[in-house]
Protein backbone atom coordinates (compact mmCIF):
# COMPACT_ATOMS: atom_id res chain seq x y z
CA UNK A 1 0.00 0.00 0.00
CA UNK A 2 1.32 3.41 -1.02
CA UNK A 3 0.12 6.97 -0.66
CA UNK A 4 1.53 7.80 2.75
CA UNK A 5 4.47 10.02 3.83
CA UNK A 6 6.36 9.22 0.64
CA UNK A 7 3.65 10.95 -1.41
CA UNK A 8 2.00 13.90 0.35
CA UNK A 9 1.37 15.84 3.54
CA UNK A 10 -2.05 14.26 3.86
CA UNK A 11 -0.47 10.85 3.47
CA UNK A 12 2.05 11.68 6.19
CA UNK A 13 -0.77 12.64 8.56
CA UNK A 14 -2.57 9.37 7.86
CA UNK A 15 0.67 7.46 8.44
CA UNK A 16 1.10 9.16 11.80
CA UNK A 17 -2.42 8.16 12.83
CA UNK A 18 -1.64 4.53 11.97
CA UNK A 19 1.58 4.64 14.01
CA UNK A 20 -0.20 6.23 16.98
CA UNK A 21 -2.91 3.57 16.86
CA UNK A 22 -0.36 0.73 16.79
CA UNK A 23 1.77 2.31 19.53
CA UNK A 24 -1.29 2.74 21.74
CA UNK A 25 -1.66 -1.03 22.05
CA UNK A 26 2.05 -1.87 22.10
CA UNK A 27 2.00 -3.34 18.61
CA UNK A 28 4.61 -3.55 15.88
CA UNK A 29 4.11 -1.95 12.48
CA UNK A 30 5.91 -2.91 9.28
CA UNK A 31 5.59 -0.32 6.51
CA UNK A 32 3.43 1.21 5.20
CA UNK A 33 4.31 1.30 1.49
CA UNK A 34 5.84 -2.20 1.52
CA UNK A 35 5.22 -5.72 0.22
CA UNK A 36 4.82 -7.28 3.67
CA UNK A 37 6.51 -9.90 5.82
CA UNK A 38 7.42 -13.51 5.09
CA UNK A 39 8.85 -16.12 7.42
CA UNK A 40 8.59 -19.80 8.23
CA UNK A 41 5.33 -19.17 10.13
CA UNK A 42 3.58 -16.53 8.07
CA UNK A 43 3.47 -15.48 4.42
CA UNK A 44 2.05 -11.97 4.47
CA UNK A 45 3.46 -10.68 1.22
CA UNK A 46 1.15 -9.60 -1.55
CA UNK A 47 3.40 -10.35 -4.47
CA UNK A 48 5.65 -13.07 -5.85
CA UNK A 49 8.05 -14.85 -5.81
CA UNK A 50 7.49 -16.81 -2.63
CA UNK A 51 10.84 -18.48 -1.82
CA UNK A 52 11.46 -21.86 -0.29
CA UNK A 53 11.56 -21.40 3.48
CA UNK A 54 14.09 -22.98 5.80
CA UNK A 55 15.01 -22.11 9.39
CA UNK A 56 18.68 -21.93 8.34
CA UNK A 57 17.91 -19.89 5.23
CA UNK A 58 18.52 -16.20 4.67
CA UNK A 59 17.07 -13.43 6.84
CA UNK A 60 16.50 -10.56 4.40
CA UNK A 61 15.60 -6.97 5.36
CA UNK A 62 14.86 -4.48 2.59
CA UNK A 63 14.07 -0.78 2.57
CA UNK A 64 12.38 -1.21 -0.81
CA UNK A 65 9.59 -3.63 -1.69
CA UNK A 66 10.31 -3.80 -5.40
CA UNK A 67 14.03 -4.26 -4.73
CA UNK A 68 13.22 -7.07 -2.30
CA UNK A 69 11.37 -8.84 -5.10
CA UNK A 70 14.25 -8.37 -7.56
CA UNK A 71 16.86 -9.59 -5.05
CA UNK A 72 14.80 -12.70 -4.30
CA UNK A 73 14.52 -13.31 -8.04
CA UNK A 74 18.33 -13.19 -8.24
CA UNK A 75 18.81 -15.43 -5.21
CA UNK A 76 16.20 -18.17 -5.64
CA UNK A 77 17.57 -19.60 -8.94
CA UNK A 78 20.98 -20.09 -7.25
CA UNK A 79 19.44 -22.46 -4.70
CA UNK A 80 19.08 -19.99 -1.84
CA UNK A 81 16.37 -20.54 0.75
CA UNK A 82 14.96 -17.95 3.13
CA UNK A 83 14.09 -17.87 6.79
CA UNK A 84 12.43 -14.45 6.66
CA UNK A 85 11.85 -11.45 4.42
CA UNK A 86 11.04 -8.05 5.90
CA UNK A 87 10.06 -5.19 3.60
CA UNK A 88 10.04 -2.13 5.88
CA UNK A 89 8.79 0.45 3.36
CA UNK A 90 8.50 3.89 4.95
CA UNK A 91 9.78 2.55 8.30
CA UNK A 92 7.14 4.63 10.05
CA UNK A 93 7.69 2.74 13.29
CA UNK A 94 10.03 -0.17 12.55
CA UNK A 95 13.01 0.17 10.21
CA UNK A 96 15.97 -1.92 9.12
CA UNK A 97 17.78 -1.13 12.37
CA UNK A 98 14.88 -2.31 14.56
CA UNK A 99 14.49 -5.57 12.62
CA UNK A 100 18.21 -6.22 13.02
CA UNK A 101 17.88 -5.47 16.74
CA UNK A 102 15.03 -8.00 16.95
CA UNK A 103 17.09 -10.66 15.14
CA UNK A 104 19.98 -10.01 17.53
CA UNK A 105 17.95 -10.07 20.73
CA UNK A 106 16.04 -13.24 19.75
CA UNK A 107 19.11 -15.05 18.39
CA UNK A 108 19.56 -18.63 19.60
CA UNK A 109 21.07 -21.92 18.51
CA UNK A 110 18.32 -22.46 15.92
CA UNK A 111 18.58 -19.01 14.31
CA UNK A 112 19.76 -18.42 10.77
CA UNK A 113 23.39 -17.36 10.43
CA UNK A 114 22.91 -15.39 7.16
CA UNK A 115 21.57 -11.83 6.99
CA UNK A 116 21.10 -9.67 3.89
CA UNK A 117 20.28 -5.96 3.97
CA UNK A 118 19.14 -3.51 1.32
CA UNK A 119 19.34 -0.04 2.87
CA UNK A 120 18.47 3.29 1.29
CA UNK A 121 18.82 5.42 4.43
CA UNK A 122 20.66 4.65 7.65
CA UNK A 123 18.72 6.58 10.27
CA UNK A 124 20.29 4.99 13.35
CA UNK A 125 23.89 4.06 12.58
CA UNK A 126 24.79 3.36 16.20
CA UNK A 127 21.96 0.82 16.49
CA UNK A 128 22.91 -0.78 13.17
CA UNK A 129 26.56 -1.04 14.24
CA UNK A 130 25.72 -2.46 17.65
CA UNK A 131 23.42 -5.24 16.48
CA UNK A 132 25.17 -6.13 13.24
CA UNK A 133 28.52 -6.55 15.01
CA UNK A 134 26.81 -8.46 17.84
CA UNK A 135 25.24 -10.89 15.36
CA UNK A 136 28.54 -11.40 13.54
CA UNK A 137 30.33 -12.06 16.82
CA UNK A 138 27.65 -14.72 17.47
CA UNK A 139 28.59 -16.46 14.23
CA UNK A 140 26.40 -14.72 11.64
CA UNK A 141 27.52 -13.39 8.28
CA UNK A 142 26.01 -10.18 6.96
CA UNK A 143 26.12 -8.57 3.52
CA UNK A 144 24.45 -5.30 2.61
CA UNK A 145 23.73 -2.89 -0.20
CA UNK A 146 23.61 0.78 0.77
CA UNK A 147 22.34 2.75 -2.20
CA UNK A 148 22.60 6.49 -2.73
CA UNK A 149 26.34 6.74 -2.16
CA UNK A 150 27.34 9.16 -4.90
CA UNK A 151 29.18 12.37 -4.14
CA UNK A 152 26.58 14.58 -5.83
CA UNK A 153 25.40 17.28 -3.49
CA UNK A 154 28.07 16.77 -0.84
CA UNK A 155 28.98 19.87 1.07
CA UNK A 156 32.11 21.79 0.10
CA UNK A 157 34.81 21.42 2.72
CA UNK A 158 37.72 23.57 3.78
CA UNK A 159 40.25 20.93 4.81
CA UNK A 160 41.92 17.79 3.50
CA UNK A 161 39.78 15.73 5.88
CA UNK A 162 36.58 17.45 4.78
CA UNK A 163 37.41 16.93 1.13
CA UNK A 164 38.15 13.22 1.58
CA UNK A 165 35.43 12.34 4.07
CA UNK A 166 31.87 11.89 2.83
CA UNK A 167 28.63 10.36 4.01
CA UNK A 168 29.31 7.31 1.85
CA UNK A 169 32.72 6.89 3.48
CA UNK A 170 30.89 6.97 6.80
CA UNK A 171 28.71 4.09 5.59
CA UNK A 172 31.80 2.22 4.37
CA UNK A 173 33.48 2.80 7.74
CA UNK A 174 30.43 1.60 9.66
CA UNK A 175 30.17 -1.58 7.59
CA UNK A 176 33.86 -2.41 8.02
CA UNK A 177 33.70 -1.66 11.74
CA UNK A 178 30.72 -4.00 12.08
CA UNK A 179 32.17 -6.70 9.82
CA UNK A 180 29.43 -6.27 7.17
CA UNK A 181 30.44 -7.16 3.59
CA UNK A 182 29.33 -4.30 1.35
CA UNK A 183 27.82 -5.12 -2.05
CA UNK A 184 27.16 -2.85 -5.01
CA UNK A 185 24.21 -4.59 -6.66
CA UNK A 186 21.61 -7.36 -6.59
CA UNK A 187 23.72 -9.97 -8.35
CA UNK A 188 26.63 -9.40 -6.00
CA UNK A 189 24.35 -9.60 -2.94
CA UNK A 190 22.89 -12.90 -4.17
CA UNK A 191 26.38 -14.23 -4.88
CA UNK A 192 27.49 -13.19 -1.40
CA UNK A 193 24.51 -14.94 0.19
CA UNK A 194 25.33 -18.15 -1.68
CA UNK A 195 28.94 -17.93 -0.47
CA UNK A 196 27.71 -17.46 3.09
CA UNK A 197 26.02 -20.88 2.94
CA UNK A 198 29.42 -22.48 2.35
CA UNK A 199 32.45 -22.58 4.66
CA UNK A 200 34.88 -19.69 4.66
CA UNK A 201 38.37 -20.79 3.57
CA UNK A 202 41.11 -20.85 6.17
CA UNK A 203 43.40 -18.82 3.89
CA UNK A 204 43.62 -17.03 0.56
CA UNK A 205 45.11 -19.84 -1.58
CA UNK A 206 42.59 -21.07 -4.13
CA UNK A 207 42.84 -24.01 -6.54
CA UNK A 208 40.88 -23.44 -9.74
CA UNK A 209 39.59 -26.72 -11.20
CA UNK A 210 38.17 -26.41 -14.69
CA UNK A 211 37.41 -28.18 -17.96
CA UNK A 212 37.35 -24.88 -19.90
CA UNK A 213 40.30 -22.51 -20.24
CA UNK A 214 38.59 -19.14 -20.67
CA UNK A 215 36.54 -19.07 -17.44
CA UNK A 216 39.61 -20.21 -15.49
CA UNK A 217 41.66 -17.29 -16.84
CA UNK A 218 38.91 -14.81 -15.97
CA UNK A 219 38.53 -16.30 -12.49
CA UNK A 220 42.30 -16.16 -11.98
CA UNK A 221 42.22 -12.45 -12.81
CA UNK A 222 39.26 -11.77 -10.49
CA UNK A 223 40.82 -13.60 -7.54
CA UNK A 224 44.31 -12.15 -8.08
CA UNK A 225 42.96 -8.61 -8.43
CA UNK A 226 41.11 -9.17 -5.16
CA UNK A 227 44.29 -10.08 -3.29
CA UNK A 228 43.85 -13.87 -3.33
CA UNK A 229 46.52 -16.35 -4.41
CA UNK A 230 46.46 -19.00 -7.15
CA UNK A 231 49.43 -21.07 -5.91
CA UNK A 232 51.56 -23.02 -8.32
CA UNK A 233 51.10 -26.76 -7.88
CA UNK A 234 54.06 -29.02 -8.61
CA UNK A 235 56.05 -31.97 -7.29
CA UNK A 236 55.60 -35.75 -7.17
CA UNK A 237 51.97 -35.62 -6.02
CA UNK A 238 51.11 -33.30 -8.91
CA UNK A 239 52.80 -35.66 -11.36
CA UNK A 240 50.91 -38.59 -9.88
CA UNK A 241 47.61 -36.73 -10.37
CA UNK A 242 48.54 -35.95 -13.98
CA UNK A 243 48.78 -39.68 -14.76
CA UNK A 244 45.08 -40.04 -13.86
CA UNK A 245 43.98 -37.38 -16.38
CA UNK A 246 43.77 -37.33 -20.17
CA UNK A 247 46.86 -36.29 -22.14
CA UNK A 248 47.06 -32.53 -22.51
CA UNK A 249 45.68 -31.82 -19.05
CA UNK A 250 47.49 -29.45 -16.68
CA UNK A 251 47.71 -29.50 -12.90
CA UNK A 252 49.87 -26.41 -12.42
CA UNK A 253 46.82 -24.34 -11.25
CA UNK A 254 44.46 -23.67 -12.79
CA UNK A 255 43.98 -27.44 -12.96
CA UNK A 256 42.56 -27.98 -16.45
CA UNK A 257 41.27 -31.51 -17.12
CA UNK A 258 39.93 -30.62 -20.59
CA UNK A 259 36.44 -30.55 -22.11
CA UNK A 260 36.45 -34.35 -22.18
CA UNK A 261 37.16 -34.62 -18.45
CA UNK A 262 35.02 -37.07 -16.49
CA UNK A 263 33.41 -37.16 -13.07
CA UNK A 264 35.97 -39.77 -12.00
CA UNK A 265 38.84 -37.48 -12.98
CA UNK A 266 37.23 -34.57 -11.14
CA UNK A 267 37.08 -36.79 -8.06
CA UNK A 268 40.83 -37.51 -8.31
CA UNK A 269 41.56 -33.78 -8.58
CA UNK A 270 39.41 -32.84 -5.60
CA UNK A 271 40.94 -35.61 -3.48
CA UNK A 272 44.46 -34.42 -4.36
CA UNK A 273 43.61 -30.81 -3.45
CA UNK A 274 42.08 -32.00 -0.21
CA UNK A 275 44.83 -34.39 0.91
CA UNK A 276 48.02 -33.82 -1.07
CA UNK A 277 48.38 -30.09 -1.78
CA UNK A 278 49.11 -28.23 1.46
CA UNK A 279 49.26 -24.88 -0.34
CA UNK A 280 45.53 -25.02 -1.22
CA UNK A 281 42.87 -23.63 1.15
CA UNK A 282 39.79 -23.98 -1.07
CA UNK A 283 38.67 -25.20 -4.51
CA UNK A 284 36.65 -23.34 -7.15
CA UNK A 285 35.28 -25.94 -9.56
CA UNK A 286 34.12 -24.72 -12.99
CA UNK A 287 32.03 -27.26 -14.88
CA UNK A 288 29.59 -26.51 -17.68
CA UNK A 289 28.54 -28.51 -20.70
CA UNK A 290 28.18 -28.12 -24.48
CA UNK A 291 24.80 -29.81 -24.07
CA UNK A 292 25.73 -32.99 -25.92
CA UNK A 293 25.32 -35.38 -22.99
CA UNK A 294 24.02 -35.34 -19.39
CA UNK A 295 26.39 -34.37 -16.55
CA UNK A 296 24.37 -35.61 -13.57
CA UNK A 297 27.32 -37.74 -12.47
CA UNK A 298 29.58 -34.66 -12.20
CA UNK A 299 27.10 -32.71 -10.11
CA UNK A 300 26.35 -35.73 -7.91
CA UNK A 301 30.08 -36.08 -7.28
CA UNK A 302 30.29 -32.37 -6.40
CA UNK A 303 27.37 -32.83 -4.00
CA UNK A 304 29.19 -35.64 -2.20
CA UNK A 305 32.63 -34.03 -2.14
CA UNK A 306 31.26 -30.71 -0.81
CA UNK A 307 30.09 -32.63 2.25
CA UNK A 308 33.11 -34.89 2.65
CA UNK A 309 36.00 -32.44 2.25
CA UNK A 310 37.31 -30.18 4.99
CA UNK A 311 38.40 -27.58 2.42
CA UNK A 312 35.53 -25.56 0.90
CA UNK A 313 34.43 -26.40 -2.65
CA UNK A 314 32.68 -23.68 -4.65
CA UNK A 315 30.64 -24.96 -7.63
CA UNK A 316 30.71 -22.60 -10.62
CA UNK A 317 28.16 -23.97 -13.10
CA UNK A 318 27.90 -21.68 -16.13
CA UNK A 319 25.67 -23.83 -18.39
CA UNK A 320 22.36 -22.62 -16.98
CA UNK A 321 20.53 -23.51 -20.22
CA UNK A 322 22.35 -26.56 -21.58
CA UNK A 323 22.20 -28.47 -18.31
CA UNK A 324 19.28 -26.76 -16.61
CA UNK A 325 17.79 -30.07 -15.51
CA UNK A 326 21.04 -31.20 -13.91
CA UNK A 327 21.44 -27.88 -12.11
CA UNK A 328 17.83 -28.08 -10.87
CA UNK A 329 18.62 -31.57 -9.59
CA UNK A 330 21.77 -30.22 -7.88
CA UNK A 331 19.77 -27.42 -6.22
CA UNK A 332 17.01 -29.82 -5.16
CA UNK A 333 19.60 -31.75 -3.16
CA UNK A 334 20.23 -28.66 -1.02
CA UNK A 335 23.08 -27.00 -2.91
CA UNK A 336 23.80 -23.50 -4.16
CA UNK A 337 25.85 -22.63 -7.23
CA UNK A 338 27.53 -19.71 -8.97
CA UNK A 339 26.69 -19.08 -12.64
CA UNK A 340 29.44 -16.49 -13.22
CA UNK A 341 33.09 -17.00 -12.30
CA UNK A 342 34.03 -13.31 -12.18
CA UNK A 343 31.15 -12.36 -9.87
CA UNK A 344 32.10 -15.30 -7.68
CA UNK A 345 35.78 -14.31 -7.57
CA UNK A 346 35.03 -10.69 -6.71
CA UNK A 347 32.59 -11.70 -3.97
CA UNK A 348 34.97 -14.21 -2.36
CA UNK A 349 37.70 -11.55 -2.42
CA UNK A 350 35.44 -9.07 -0.62
CA UNK A 351 34.60 -11.60 2.07
CA UNK A 352 38.26 -12.26 2.80
CA UNK A 353 39.08 -8.54 2.73
CA UNK A 354 36.36 -7.60 5.24
CA UNK A 355 37.75 -7.43 8.78
CA UNK A 356 36.14 -9.03 11.80
CA UNK A 357 33.94 -6.71 13.89
CA UNK A 358 35.51 -4.83 16.74
CA UNK A 359 35.14 -6.28 20.25
CA UNK A 360 32.11 -5.10 22.19
CA UNK A 361 34.46 -3.26 24.56
CA UNK A 362 38.11 -2.23 24.45
CA UNK A 363 40.56 0.04 26.25
CA UNK A 364 40.91 3.64 25.11
CA UNK A 365 43.92 5.84 25.91
CA UNK A 366 43.76 8.09 28.95
CA UNK A 367 43.54 11.78 28.05
CA UNK A 368 43.10 15.04 29.98
CA UNK A 369 39.38 15.63 29.38
CA UNK A 370 39.27 18.59 31.81
CA UNK A 371 41.92 20.52 29.83
CA UNK A 372 40.17 19.69 26.56
CA UNK A 373 36.79 20.90 27.79
CA UNK A 374 38.33 24.10 29.15
CA UNK A 375 39.35 25.05 25.59
CA UNK A 376 36.30 23.75 23.74
CA UNK A 377 33.69 25.20 26.10
CA UNK A 378 34.95 28.74 25.58
CA UNK A 379 35.68 28.35 21.87
CA UNK A 380 33.50 29.92 19.19
CA UNK A 381 32.63 28.30 15.88
CA UNK A 382 35.52 28.25 13.45
CA UNK A 383 39.17 27.22 13.55
CA UNK A 384 40.95 27.24 16.88
CA UNK A 385 44.04 29.36 17.29
CA UNK A 386 47.35 27.52 17.02
CA UNK A 387 47.81 27.98 20.75
CA UNK A 388 44.47 26.35 21.62
CA UNK A 389 45.12 23.61 19.07
CA UNK A 390 48.38 22.82 20.82
CA UNK A 391 46.59 22.62 24.19
CA UNK A 392 44.17 20.03 22.80
CA UNK A 393 46.98 18.05 21.20
CA UNK A 394 48.96 17.97 24.43
CA UNK A 395 45.88 17.07 26.50
CA UNK A 396 45.17 14.15 24.17
CA UNK A 397 48.78 12.96 24.36
CA UNK A 398 49.43 13.53 20.66
CA UNK A 399 53.17 14.05 20.30
CA UNK A 400 54.10 17.19 18.37
CA UNK A 401 57.07 19.27 17.47
CA UNK A 402 57.97 22.13 19.80
CA UNK A 403 56.33 24.72 17.60
CA UNK A 404 55.74 28.36 18.40
CA UNK A 405 53.58 30.93 16.70
CA UNK A 406 55.48 34.20 16.38
CA UNK A 407 54.03 37.57 15.48
CA UNK A 408 57.15 39.70 15.24
CA UNK A 409 60.59 39.32 13.70
CA UNK A 410 62.21 39.60 17.14
CA UNK A 411 60.13 36.65 18.39
CA UNK A 412 61.10 34.64 15.31
CA UNK A 413 64.83 35.30 15.77
CA UNK A 414 64.71 34.57 19.49
CA UNK A 415 62.95 31.23 18.96
CA UNK A 416 65.41 30.16 16.25
CA UNK A 417 68.41 31.04 18.40
CA UNK A 418 66.97 29.12 21.37
CA UNK A 419 65.93 25.97 19.43
CA UNK A 420 68.71 25.83 16.85
CA UNK A 421 68.75 25.08 13.12
CA UNK A 422 67.46 23.97 10.63
CA UNK A 423 64.05 25.56 11.18
CA UNK A 424 60.70 25.22 9.41
CA UNK A 425 58.57 28.33 8.91
CA UNK A 426 54.87 28.23 7.97
CA UNK A 427 52.20 30.86 7.52
CA UNK A 428 49.32 30.94 10.01
CA UNK A 429 46.01 31.85 8.40
CA UNK A 430 45.83 30.37 4.88
CA UNK A 431 44.29 26.89 4.71
CA UNK A 432 46.55 25.36 2.07
CA UNK A 433 49.97 26.65 3.04
CA UNK A 434 51.98 24.99 0.28
CA UNK A 435 49.68 26.37 -2.43
CA UNK A 436 50.46 29.98 -1.47
CA UNK A 437 54.20 29.47 -0.96
CA UNK A 438 53.72 29.57 2.77
CA UNK A 439 56.09 26.77 3.81
CA UNK A 440 59.86 27.18 4.08
CA UNK A 441 62.10 24.22 4.93
CA UNK A 442 65.78 24.05 5.92
CA UNK A 443 66.06 27.57 7.26
CA UNK A 444 69.72 27.49 8.30
CA UNK A 445 70.60 30.91 9.76
CA UNK A 446 69.18 34.15 11.25
CA UNK A 447 69.47 36.07 7.98
CA UNK A 448 67.17 33.56 6.24
CA UNK A 449 64.77 33.69 9.20
CA UNK A 450 64.52 37.48 8.81
CA UNK A 451 64.11 37.39 5.02
CA UNK A 452 61.48 34.66 5.01
CA UNK A 453 59.54 36.13 7.93
CA UNK A 454 59.06 39.38 6.02
CA UNK A 455 57.98 37.49 2.88
CA UNK A 456 55.58 35.15 4.64
CA UNK A 457 53.82 37.94 6.52
CA UNK A 458 52.94 39.58 3.17
CA UNK A 459 50.99 36.51 1.96
CA UNK A 460 47.24 37.09 1.91
CA UNK A 461 45.35 36.10 5.11
CA UNK A 462 48.60 35.54 7.04
CA UNK A 463 48.64 37.01 10.54
CA UNK A 464 51.54 35.06 12.12
CA UNK A 465 54.26 32.51 11.41
CA UNK A 466 54.67 29.09 13.02
CA UNK A 467 58.24 27.94 13.62
CA UNK A 468 59.69 24.67 14.75
CA UNK A 469 62.93 22.73 14.58
CA UNK A 470 62.94 20.69 11.38
CA UNK A 471 62.19 17.01 11.88
CA UNK A 472 62.86 14.15 9.49
CA UNK A 473 60.76 11.14 8.51
CA UNK A 474 57.95 9.93 6.28
CA UNK A 475 54.93 12.20 6.11
CA UNK A 476 51.71 10.64 7.45
CA UNK A 477 48.29 12.05 8.17
CA UNK A 478 45.54 11.67 10.77
CA UNK A 479 42.23 13.47 10.53
CA UNK A 480 38.69 13.47 11.87
CA UNK A 481 35.35 14.72 10.61
CA UNK A 482 31.93 14.75 12.24
CA UNK A 483 29.34 13.19 9.97
CA UNK A 484 25.63 13.65 10.59
CA UNK A 485 24.18 10.72 12.65
CA UNK A 486 27.40 8.69 12.38
CA UNK A 487 29.54 10.64 14.83
CA UNK A 488 33.19 11.16 13.94
CA UNK A 489 35.06 9.51 11.10
CA UNK A 490 38.76 8.98 11.76
CA UNK A 491 41.08 9.03 8.73
CA UNK A 492 44.71 7.98 8.38
CA UNK A 493 47.16 7.64 5.51
CA UNK A 494 50.16 9.22 3.85
CA UNK A 495 50.47 12.93 4.55
CA UNK A 496 51.86 16.09 3.03
CA UNK A 497 50.99 16.68 -0.60
CA UNK A 498 50.52 12.93 -1.09
CA UNK A 499 47.13 13.09 0.57
CA UNK A 500 45.84 15.16 -2.34
CA UNK A 501 47.66 13.26 -5.07
CA UNK A 502 47.27 9.65 -3.93
CA UNK A 503 44.20 9.95 -1.67
CA UNK A 504 45.36 6.72 -0.05
CA UNK A 505 43.43 7.12 3.19
CA UNK A 506 41.53 4.63 5.35
CA UNK A 507 38.58 5.56 7.51
CA UNK A 508 36.73 4.20 10.50
CA UNK A 509 34.28 5.51 13.08
CA UNK A 510 35.19 6.65 16.56
CA UNK A 511 35.75 5.17 19.04
CA UNK A 512 38.27 2.68 17.69
CA UNK A 513 40.51 0.08 19.22
CA UNK A 514 44.25 -0.21 18.83
CA UNK A 515 43.67 -3.31 16.67
CA UNK A 516 41.52 -1.33 14.28
CA UNK A 517 44.14 1.41 14.13
CA UNK A 518 46.69 -1.20 13.03
CA UNK A 519 44.23 -2.50 10.43
CA UNK A 520 43.82 1.03 9.06
CA UNK A 521 47.58 1.37 8.69
CA UNK A 522 48.30 -2.06 7.26
CA UNK A 523 45.51 -1.98 4.65
CA UNK A 524 46.85 1.21 3.02
CA UNK A 525 48.06 0.77 -0.54
CA UNK A 526 51.13 2.76 0.52
CA UNK A 527 51.84 0.54 3.53
CA UNK A 528 55.21 -0.34 1.99
CA UNK A 529 56.37 3.24 2.57
CA UNK A 530 55.30 3.05 6.22
CA UNK A 531 57.19 -0.24 6.61
CA UNK A 532 60.25 1.31 4.97
CA UNK A 533 61.38 0.81 1.38
CA UNK A 534 64.54 1.04 -0.71
CA UNK A 535 66.82 1.80 2.22
CA UNK A 536 64.58 4.51 3.70
CA UNK A 537 63.46 4.30 7.29
CA UNK A 538 59.86 3.36 7.95
CA UNK A 539 57.40 4.70 10.49
CA UNK A 540 56.97 3.26 13.98
CA UNK A 541 53.59 1.55 13.61
CA UNK A 542 53.02 1.20 17.36
CA UNK A 543 53.37 4.94 17.89
CA UNK A 544 51.28 5.79 14.82
CA UNK A 545 48.48 3.44 15.90
CA UNK A 546 48.55 5.00 19.37
CA UNK A 547 48.28 8.50 17.86
CA UNK A 548 45.26 7.41 15.79
CA UNK A 549 43.47 6.12 18.90
CA UNK A 550 44.27 9.38 20.69
CA UNK A 551 42.65 11.45 17.95
CA UNK A 552 39.60 9.20 18.35
CA UNK A 553 39.59 9.77 22.11
CA UNK A 554 39.93 13.53 21.56
CA UNK A 555 36.85 13.83 19.34
CA UNK A 556 34.84 11.61 21.71
CA UNK A 557 35.71 14.02 24.53
CA UNK A 558 34.97 17.04 22.31
CA UNK A 559 32.13 16.19 19.89
CA UNK A 560 32.06 19.89 18.95
CA UNK A 561 35.14 19.25 16.81
CA UNK A 562 33.76 19.29 13.27
CA UNK A 563 37.01 18.80 11.34
CA UNK A 564 40.55 18.05 12.42
CA UNK A 565 43.69 17.77 10.29
CA UNK A 566 47.08 16.69 11.55
CA UNK A 567 49.06 17.00 8.35
CA UNK A 568 51.76 16.07 8.32
CA UNK A 569 53.08 13.98 11.12
CA UNK A 570 56.71 13.08 10.54
CA UNK A 571 57.44 9.50 11.44
CA UNK A 572 60.52 7.32 11.70
CA UNK A 573 61.40 4.33 13.92
CA UNK A 574 62.00 6.64 16.91
CA UNK A 575 59.06 9.03 16.91
CA UNK A 576 55.89 10.17 15.15
CA UNK A 577 55.45 13.90 15.71
CA UNK A 578 52.76 16.26 14.47
CA UNK A 579 54.24 19.32 12.79
CA UNK A 580 51.00 21.01 11.69
CA UNK A 581 47.41 20.73 12.88
CA UNK A 582 44.08 22.50 12.40
CA UNK A 583 40.92 22.01 14.45
CA UNK A 584 37.54 23.44 13.49
CA UNK A 585 34.74 23.78 16.02
CA UNK A 586 31.03 23.76 15.21
CA UNK A 587 28.52 23.92 18.06
CA UNK A 588 24.75 23.45 18.09
CA UNK A 589 24.84 21.84 14.64
CA UNK A 590 25.87 25.11 12.96
Image (cartoon, rainbow, N blue to C red):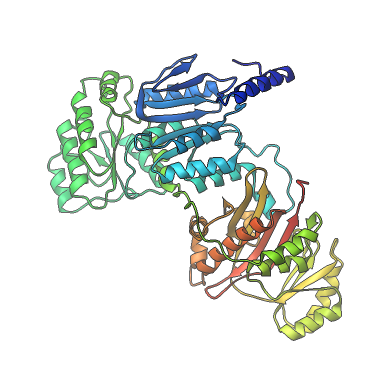
Residue 370 position, x and y percent, is 70, 65
In the displayed structure, does residue 358 sit left or right of residue 238?
Answer: right
Q: Nearer the viewer, residue 380 or 184?
A: 380
- Relative to 481, residue 244 above or below: above
Which residue appears at 67% of the width and 76% of the height?
Answer: 470
In the displayed structure, does residue 584 sit left or right of residue 18?
Answer: right
Residue 17 position, x and y percent, is 67, 20
| Figure disc tally | 0
- Residue 350 visible from this viewpoint: no
Q: For the view shown, which residue lies furthest in the front direction?
A: 25
- Relative to 551, residue 360 above or below: above
Residue 549 position, x and y percent, is 57, 61
- Where is the N terminus found, in terms of image quarters? top right
Residue 298 position, x and y percent, is 20, 29
Which residue appears at 55% of the width and 61% of the height?
Answer: 364
Which residue appears at 52% of the width and 18% of the height?
Answer: 35
Amino acid sequence: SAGFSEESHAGAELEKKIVDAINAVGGSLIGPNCIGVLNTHYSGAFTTPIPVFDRQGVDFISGSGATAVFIMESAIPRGLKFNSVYSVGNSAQTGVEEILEYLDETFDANSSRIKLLYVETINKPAKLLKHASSLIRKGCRIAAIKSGGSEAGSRAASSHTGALASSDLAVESLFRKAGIVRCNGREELATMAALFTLPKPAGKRIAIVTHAGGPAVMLTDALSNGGLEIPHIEGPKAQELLTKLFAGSSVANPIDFLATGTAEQLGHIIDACEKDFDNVDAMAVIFGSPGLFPVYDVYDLLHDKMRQCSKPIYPILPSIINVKNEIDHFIARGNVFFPDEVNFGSALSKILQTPDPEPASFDVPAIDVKAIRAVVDKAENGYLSPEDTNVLMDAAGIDRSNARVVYTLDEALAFAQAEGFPQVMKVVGPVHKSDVGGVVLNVMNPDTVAREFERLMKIKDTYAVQMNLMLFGAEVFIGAKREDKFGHMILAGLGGIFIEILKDVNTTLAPLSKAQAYEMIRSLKSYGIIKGARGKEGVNEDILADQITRVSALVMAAPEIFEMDINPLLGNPRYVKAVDARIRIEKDGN
